[in-house]
Image: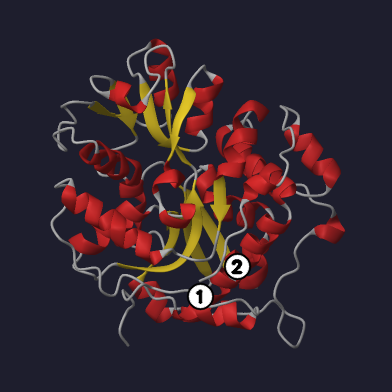
Amino acid sequence: MSAARPLNTLRAIAVTATLPLLLTACGYGSEAKKDDAPKANVAADGSAKKLSASEVRIGYFPNLTHATALVGLQEGLIAKELGATAIKPQAFNAGPSEIEALNGGSLDIGFIGPSPSINAYVKSKGSNLRIISGSASGGVKLVVNPAKIKTLDDLKGKNIATPQKGNTQDVAFLNWIADKGWKVDPESGKGDVSVVRTDNKVTPDAFKSGSIDGAWVPEPTASKLVSDGGAVLLDETALWPDKKFVITNIIVSQKFLKEHPDVVEAVLTGTVKTNEWINANPEKAKASANAKLAAEGGKPLDAKVIDPAWPSIQITDDPLASTLKTQAEWAVKAKLIEQPDLNGIYDLTLLNKVLKAAGKPEVSDAGLGATK
């Protein structure tokens, strides 16, 4: 299994509202110096390398937990491996809409959380996607109003937000509640704790207004709540062996994988190189991710948000497949899904080929690999 290098071992840098100008001056980001710009993969005759598809449509969320996509696109590290194949990036705000695009044929490859991957695979009876790589671990926290909640036991009777019913954080929180011996109806969210399903964009305003007392959310939403006076009561990594669990993986349409394996391999080569660059250059990578977020949302994250958020996320090629199995078990326990058949949800053949070529250890599918 490949070991992710924790970002929290390295110092954070301040990111200000003038970030785009700073990025230009430093030679990374959207206005990189000419000498630093990635060069296209070229054929023997010097022309851009031609792969089997003219374009590849890649989906991702404008979240820090999708740092591989943010940095890989911002720095051109994925495009470099694709040669003459153009990238058509698409930003999504929720897993269901990204899965819908994949199922509808308007998306080829996507960065997405484990719960949407599980749900989509099960609903299609294993016909629509494969998980082909990991991307990130961690980056999820329980943030509360410290005036109302001082200990974990104080959550009883409180209103706590999760991003969406059945999403990765919702499943984890429901499991935590069950382990406490408390009861919550998974459909309505009502019970000993009121689980309030709230879009991450709305959660900070709901927290400031007092309509929620806390939230179990990914970064950067968690650090936004802290900047608004919240306190971190629990980091989800504390609940996992080795303090690792999949928060983002890479999926592909089975049709696209079958028809264009060379393009998928090129994308994975780009993501592996991106992850290596992120872990070797955490400060530059943080600024690069923030520049991409600024391009998506109109402004970068404030330093008081991104500085504490970034170190809590581990960037890794390993899909941490055993933790996805655990998350599926939690969803069954919460009665959100029936016992799923996840055999074949992974196809790590091309990822392990890329890792081997790069001199890196291969990763495991925990016995859930596709049969040939």
Q: Which residue is mark 2?
A: 272
Q: Which residue is mark 1?
A: 351
In-image side of 261 versus 253 (left or right): right
Callout 2–callout 1 Cβ contact below 8 Å = yes
* Colour approach in the figure: secondary structure
Q: Residues within 10 Å of mark 2 (few under 14, many from 20)?
A: many
Q: Nearer the viewer, residue 101 or 36?
A: 36
* Residue at 66% over, 63% down: 276
Q: Nearer the viewer, residue 78 or 247?
A: 247
Q: Is residue 251 above or below residue 181?
A: below
Q: Disc 1 on helix, strand or loop?
A: helix
In-image side of 251 versus 20 (left or right): left
Q: Disc 2 on helix, strand or loop?
A: helix
Q: Give the distance between the C-alpha atoms of the residues marked 2 and 1, in whole angstroms.
A: 8 Å
Inspect the image, locate mark 1, and give the three-letter code of the amino acid beneath it. Leu
Res 100 visible: no
Quadrant assignment, res 158: top left
Of callouts 2 and 1, which one flags the residue occurring earlier in the amino acid sequence? 2
> Residue 232's x, y, as percent?
48, 28
Res 210 visible: yes
Inspect the image, locate mark 2, and give the three-letter code of the amino acid beneath it. Val
Quadrant assignment, res 208: top left
Quadrant assignment, res 161: top left
Q: Residues within 10 Å of mark 1 (few under 14, many from 20)?
A: many
> Residue 118's x, y, as percent?
28, 59
Q: Is residue 146 above or below residue 110?
A: above
How many circles with numbers are drawn on the protein?
2
> Residue 13's x, y, as percent?
74, 37
In-image side of 190 versus 352 (left or right): left
Q: Is residue 108 above or below residue 169?
A: below
* Residue at 63% over, 30% down: 299
> Residue 286's x, y, as percent?
67, 44
